[in-house]
Image (cartoon, coloured by chain):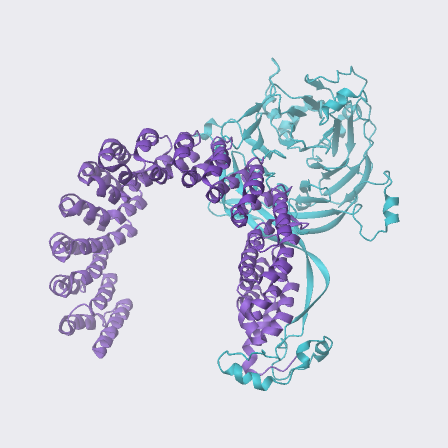
Chain colours: A cyan, B purple
Amino acid sequence: MSGGDEVVAAPVGPPQPLDWKFSQVFGERTAGEEVQEVDIISAIEFDKTGDHLATGDRGGRVVLFERTDTKDPGLSRRDLERMDYPISRHPEFRYKTEFQSHEPEFDYLKSLEIEEKINKIRWCQTANGALFLLSTNDKTIKFWKVQEKKVKKISDMNLDPSKTVGNGCIASSSNSSCPKPCLANGGSSDRSCNYFGNDFSFPPGGLPSLRLPVVTSQETSLVARCRRVYAHAHDYHINSISNNSDGETFISADDLRINLWNLEISNQSFNIVDVKPANMEDLTEVITSAEFHPTHCNMLAYSSSKGSIRLIDLRRSALCDSHSKLFEEPEAPGSRSFFTEIIASISDIKFAKDGRYILSRDYMTIKLWDINMDSGPFATFQVHEYLRPKLCDLYENDSIFDKFECCLSGDGLRVATGSYSNLFRVFGCAPGSTEATTLEASKNPIRRQVQTPSRPSRSLSSITRVVRRGAETPGVDANGNSLDFTTKLLHLAWHPAENSIACAAANSLYMYYA
Amino acid sequence: MAMIDEPLYPIAVLIDELKNEDIQLRLNSIRRLSTIARALGEERTRKELIPFLSENNDDDDEVLLAMAEELGVFIPYVGGVEYANVLLPPLETLCTVEETCVRDKAVESLCRIGAQLREQDLVESFIPLVKRLASGEWFAARVSSCGLFHIAYPTAPDALKTELRTIYGQLCQDDMPMVRRSAATNLGKFAASVEAPHLKVDIMSIFDDLTQDDQDSVRLLAVEGCAALGKLLEPQDCVAHILPVIVNFSQDKSWRVRYMVANQLYELCEAVGPEPTRSDLVPAYVRLLRDNEAEVRIAAAGKVTKFCRILNPELTIQHILPCVKELSTDSSQHVRSALASVIMGMAPILGKDATIEQLLPIFLSLLKDEFPDVRLNIISKLDQVNQVIGIDLLSQSLLPAIVELAEDRHWRVRLAIIEYIPLLASQLGVGFFDDKLGALCMQWLKDKVYSIRDAAANNVKRLAEEFGPDWAMQHIVPQVLDMINNPHYLYRMTILHAISLLAPVMGSDITCSKLLPVVINASKDRVPNIKFNVAKVLQSLIPIVDQSVVEKTIRPCLVELSEDPDVDVRFFAGQALESSDQVMMSS
């Protein structure tokens, strides 16, 4: 999609559908094990390089994973060359560390409980080998630094901390083992102490009996430190945070407002979007998700509960209540029903890496939008059309309000999003691609499924909007009872550089590659 | 552990605590690093303490920040300037940490040390350090390096100078916006150290790149560079190179960039000279005054006086005043407020006639503004207009404005106007004050909010200072004393407070004849709070009045209070008696 010209020029056709394989699972449930509410994963995010992965859970914890298959300094050149085989190379991660990011709180002014659940995680610029990330719950954003610290052992103190001054010389072994110049020219302490008694006029040569502590460090451990807390800026629940490409600022969005922060300043933020009507009874639309453009520092997109995406330009004015561009699907005539507006609500938007396309997820579909085309979506993919007859049930049990996330591959050729029964779907969005795969978050992701019957291929150069009927999985649909609305795959992330997906099924993190 | 002699104990503890687990103790030790260094002596400071600090640099940021600061003034403790380069390694490491404030402090300390280094050390140690940082793997090091070039450059040999300029150019095109921002911020300083021919070529091309950066945050720092560079260049070069840039910036798509221009523009007028100012900068400024974005208009309006000071009055009247008129009715109250805070300063620039003709209507409309800040800002700068046209023309409009502010429902607004009353009184004169404002001052003494009553009491004192005791005796004191009979004890307390403030101004005679009897009378109050405040006031009166009065009037009253059933009254009466004893002893 990013190389549109190329595709037009070379008649290579769409890329082949990917063959997804199971890679790893963290926190797999044993049969019959009950899931603890606090362990349920509520956020997943790869960092920019794809070398790290972070998950947040409802218990307020953030767990970090690091990639193990790329950098291994211990390997010889020959080993490295051997590793260059393209086959066995897929991202593999291992547990790195975890920390408690948020704790449950109580807002006494509003008599409101603030749960610790992590709503979003965003990685910031790494520096000096330390990792930085932002995590947020409903109200408070925190800036974390995760760094290896040496575990220090301190010896050779002037005063033995455990003994009184009088009977020193206990730990003399550690003393003598460290050759310090001060021992050599000792012995003049009686002279110098006279000087010292004489009110802080030290002898020109200093006091030889004083020594500096010796610090030895054998091992390192990972330490997470909360560097800043950005609090008290949101009256409603924060649904998104997003870093700016300038490396200096980020936004946080709640139901009605978007605030702009400087990473270094935690006690002030600027309100840039406010959709709160003067009278709350006039409220018809809330902000559901917001994200900065990946490269243009002045552009930001936010989605709404009415299914529209607004692009705003921070350069135009300090308050961006009026948008620069509006993306909406024109309503099909006669199709309106009680559920139309509910299922139109966008639960997540993501910019593609090049910033030209925006992916959005509403209840029934994912849509790809070209930011240069505001007449309608560039492509639409049906995620679980077979649920349409069941909307009433879904409304009854509140499932219709589930907020599914969506993601794009690093090359922008494919998109993915989750569904019920721990299923997730991958669609090819390159022109001409018919790829539509359904996978299950389990060790055996490939369920029996039927490929889409061949359909008329559309012209390669077309910018025309095509509503695609993605490959449904009649297997599941036919015995619809197998659909389980309690096991839903809400959160997933695509590796920024490779075809690898991390997705959360309750408390388990599954990773797949192709 | 080693035997430590008793007198060395404190310093030994200090050294040990460099590595204590408690961050507060470590911080404390670092703060007294100079003491440790003196105890160790210069040689061991160089050979042990400094390497020790270099190795232990993964401490908490607070400790690192303190270390960076201490090391900046450490030259005397390592043996003077010839050994100063031993301080460079630990500071170099501190320049690479992620925390901005630590890095900034380390750069500051390095600059301080670099300025004192011998030329040889600069070339052999300092410049390589700058180059290392500039090619650092992580952006933090590169960010820090930008702030060191202006120290490194002047002493460098020619070949190195060329290299340093090239490196700086590369930093301005770094991948990381943070580095480019730092390079943009420090460009002015670096440019000042570069020779004129290179300035025109190398630095200007660097500057051009920065002005076209696609990150707004970089471009707006480049705006700041405009003024700095403009002052370094010859006027004709400035016109050729800087003027087009600033004119472009004044029409930038990003309001934040235009905002910066609005703040900086007046500085550039001096650099380019009068003719380009008239032909290019005035139109640019007028555009900014009429900008779509309120934030830009706020910045531009706030600089209107500074800008006009550079222009001649005709240009001001012809081009700027029409905008000022528009701004005085701007839709944003913050724009009007910014304008009101500076517009009075335009009166001396325009002179009497133009002020009366052009500015006065604007003053008057701003004085009637619905937003109290606007009115307050006008009133606070009244003296500037008074010098030019006198107050009479304004006074008719002033009074309603003051009265309205005095009765504003927000106590902060009332507080603000009280603060200005002495200024107003001095500008308006006794006559006007007596007629119109006296009553207001008394009314504030009975305000519902403590801060207002407190400020009002203070105001009464300042008025007495302004107009003298005789006037105060006639116009303030009787009214104030009347209020001591207020049924509410809080108001009576305010009056006691006012009396204690007035007494030193009024002098001994009036205090004894008028103020003291009222205070003594209040000692019979039924509310203990009043009584112990009486004790406090009496204590403050002791040094003012005659010794005989203390003996005859004050002490008996205090003695009586010291036997009061209320414990607080007894306490303060006792305190007052004690201080009267001391006064007697000393005299």
Is there any visible trace of residue B184 in the rendered image?
no
In which quadrant will I find the C terminus of chain A?
top right
In which quadrant will I find the N terminus of chain A?
top right
Q: Residue at coordinates 16% horizontally, 43% vertically from top-left?
A: B436
Looking at the image, residue A410 sits to the left or right of residue A235; the answer is: right
Residue A500 in which image quadrant: top right
Q: Position of residue B388 (x, y in %)?
A: 22, 41
Looking at the image, residue A258 sits to the left or right of residue A469; the answer is: left
Up-down relation of residue B171 to residue B24 (above or below): above
- Which residue is at the far bottom? A190
Q: Residue at coordinates 27% horizontally, 69% vertically from top-left?
A: B572
Looking at the image, residue A81 sits to the left or right of residue B402; the answer is: right
Say which of B518 and A181 sits in front.
A181
Q: Residue at coordinates 69% horizontally, 76% vertically from top-left?
A: A180
Q: Position of residue A410 (x, y in %)?
A: 72, 34
Is there any visible trace of residue B293 in the rendered image?
yes
- Which residue is at the far top? A334
Say which of A386 and B317 sits in front.
B317
Up-down relation of residue B10 to residue B456 (above or below): below
Say which of A310 and B421 sits in front.
B421
Residue B18 in which image quadrant: bottom right
Up-down relation of residue A190 to residue B126 (above or below): below
Q: Position of residue B176 (x, y in %)?
A: 63, 43
Looking at the image, residue B104 sits to the left or right of residue A278; the answer is: right
Q: Position of residue A486 (x, y in %)?
A: 69, 35
Up-down relation of residue A438 to residue B452 (above or below): above
Say which of A499 and B234 sits in front.
B234
